[in-house]
Image (cartoon, rainbow, N blue to C red):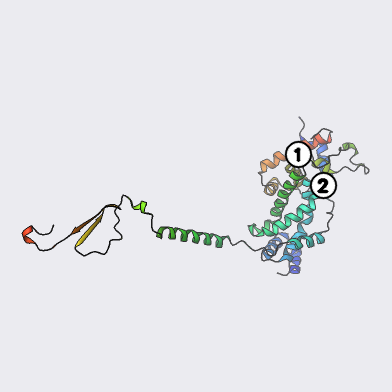
Amino acid sequence: MDVHETVLRVALVGVDTTTADLVRTALEGDRDAFGVLVESHWDRLVRLARSVVGDAEAEDVVQDSLVVAWTRLARLSDPQSFGPWVSRIVFRRCLRASRRQRGRVSLDAVPEPSRWCDPEVSVSAWQVLARLAPRQSAVLHLTAVEGMTDAEIARILGITPASVRAHRRRARAGVARIVRGGTS
Amino acid sequence: MRDPDRDDLVMSFEDRLREWSRRSPNLPTSIARTRVLARLPEVSRPVPWLRLAAAAALVVVLVVAVWRGSPRPAGEVKGSIAWNCPPPLDRNIVVWQLDDRTTVYFALRPGEPDKGGVS
């Protein structure tokens, strides 16, 4: 299938059908089709990786994950579920990266919450996320930023929806403790 | 105990998280695509699992067939009578091989009526 035709179908048919077509075409060795998949998922995957490993490593982790996804594309049983499947690969590689970087992340003091709206205060969400466990950061991100359901999050993280709820509860308790000035 | 799900600070943090996540990646999408494609190994073909499984099964069948067809070590026939390889003998001779050391030959002789017939 011609890639331009595929891109046109994105507009006409909708993302799901096109993603499945692109995956099938990529499976036949078509790099351009895989390139379209990379472009359509890049931003979302980088956002997820940032919340788990931070800015410094996120884009490298996502690039590595996409190369891994290409080599494992034949294992994807449902081509329509490319999005959650590749997110899961990214999350697993984030876990590895966060194990490597443990202890190397500088945890600067978090500014007072009352000053968060002050444009001169550069409070980064990462200053808080870095103090949470990687799964807790991922659950918080997928809930608050991507607006996913527990079942969708569970599928990406490879855990049950009940575990998702438990991780979210712990993450929120951790955030509350951190922003009130306590330690992690 | 406060419910962290309803904590204002947590809600405020989640707003902050959404805002923080909205930033564009440092690497523009088109460059990311070029870099990823440059790193892809040659071809991604479906792994022929069925073919691999069939080949493995064939190898197993061949190994079993060869093993069963090969001569057994002498120890394995101990205690049983080997019937399958009689030596070429006269049709009037009967052989019983009781074990690998003991073979009994019976010779059948027709006619000798004065001695009571076949012994």
What separation in Å lies between label 1 and label 2 (alpha carbons)? 16 Å
- Residue B75 or A160: which is nearer the viewer? B75
Residue B34 x/y as whole percent = 79, 62
Residue type at mark 1 is: Ala
Which quadrant of the figure contains the N terminus of chain A? bottom right
**In the rendered structure, the residue with mark 1 lies on which chain?**
A
Instruction: Residue at 82%, 47% (x, y): give it.
Output: B18
Label 2 element class:
helix
Q: Is residue B15 visible?
A: no
Given the current orientation, which residue lies at the most extreme top position? B1
Q: Residue at x 73, y 60 (%)?
A: A15
Return the residue at label 1. Answer: A171
Q: Quadrant of residue B12?
A: top right
Q: Residue at x 24, y 56 (%)?
A: B96
Contact? badges 1 and 2 (CB < 8 Å): no
Residue B84 screen position, x and y as percent: 30, 59
